[in-house]
Structure formats: structure tokens, C-alpha cells
Image (cartoon, rainbow, N blue to C red):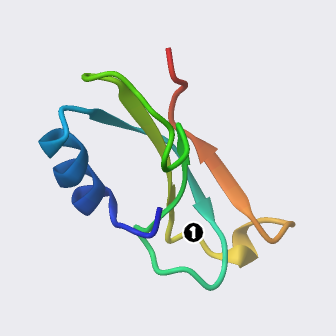
Amino acid sequence: KGLTYSEAETKLRASNLNIRLLATRYDLPLRRGMIIDQTPQPGEEVVNGSLVGVTVHSSASRDQGTSDSLWRTHGNLP
């Protein structure tokens, strides 16, 4: 959390882990492109080659929806 997708991808690959974008969400006041959630959570133990799913802050405007958060799903963990 708190990294961009590109920064997280670099760190995870260096640790022999994989990354997948699960969703994007507009949520103030975060900067576009920042990871705002992940599965598994930071600190959880995983085996080499595991997949880390992330939710990234999008550039969608709050005016495009009726709630404070807008979600767009990109896929699910296997």
C-alpha cells in the first residue's frame, strides 16, 4: 500500500512475487495510481511465486457516481 503499481511491481518481482490489478477505485484525497488495498495484506507470509492482488486509485471523478467511492473490477484472484 502507498506505492504506485509500477513501484510495487518492481519490489514484488525482486521478491519473486507476482502482481495483478484487481480493481480501480476513486477515493479522495489519494493521488492517482497509488495502491490503496492489497491481498494478501502487508506482513502476511506467502510462498515464492505467489500472486499479490492490488486495488489502485483511479482518475475517475466523484461526479461520475452517486457515492464517495467508485469501483471498477478488473479480475479476481484464482
Residue at far bottom of view: 29
Tell whether 12 sits left or right of 65.
left
Looking at the picture, does residue 36 appear above or below residue 24? below
Q: Could you say whether the residue bearing mark 1 is in a helix, strand or loop?
A: loop
Image coords of residue 68 (percent x, y)? 80, 71
Looking at the picture, does residue 48 appear above or below residue 72? above
Image coords of residue 6 (percent x, y)? 23, 58
Q: Which residue is drawn at 85% across and 66% down?
A: 67
Residue at far top of view: 78
Tell whether 33 sits left or right of 49.
right
Determine the image quadrant of residue 39: top right
Looking at the picture, does residue 64 appear above or below residue 9? below
Q: Which of 41 and 33 is in front in this view?
A: 41
Q: Mark 1 points at which residue?
A: 60
Mark 1 residue type: Ala
- Crowding near the residue tagged with mark 1, few <14, some 14–19, many ≥20 C-alpha atoms within 10 Å: some
Image coords of residue 47 (percent x, y)? 34, 22
Q: Residue at x 17, y 52 (%)?
A: 10
What is the count of numbered marks?
Answer: 1
Q: Residue at x 55, y 25 (%)?
A: 76
Tell whether 22 sits left or right of 70.
left
Q: Which of 44 and 37 is in front in this view?
A: 44
Determine the image quadrant of residue 13: top left
Looking at the picture, does residue 51 appear above or below residue 36? above
Q: Residue at x 43, y 68 (%)?
A: 34
Residue at far right of view: 66
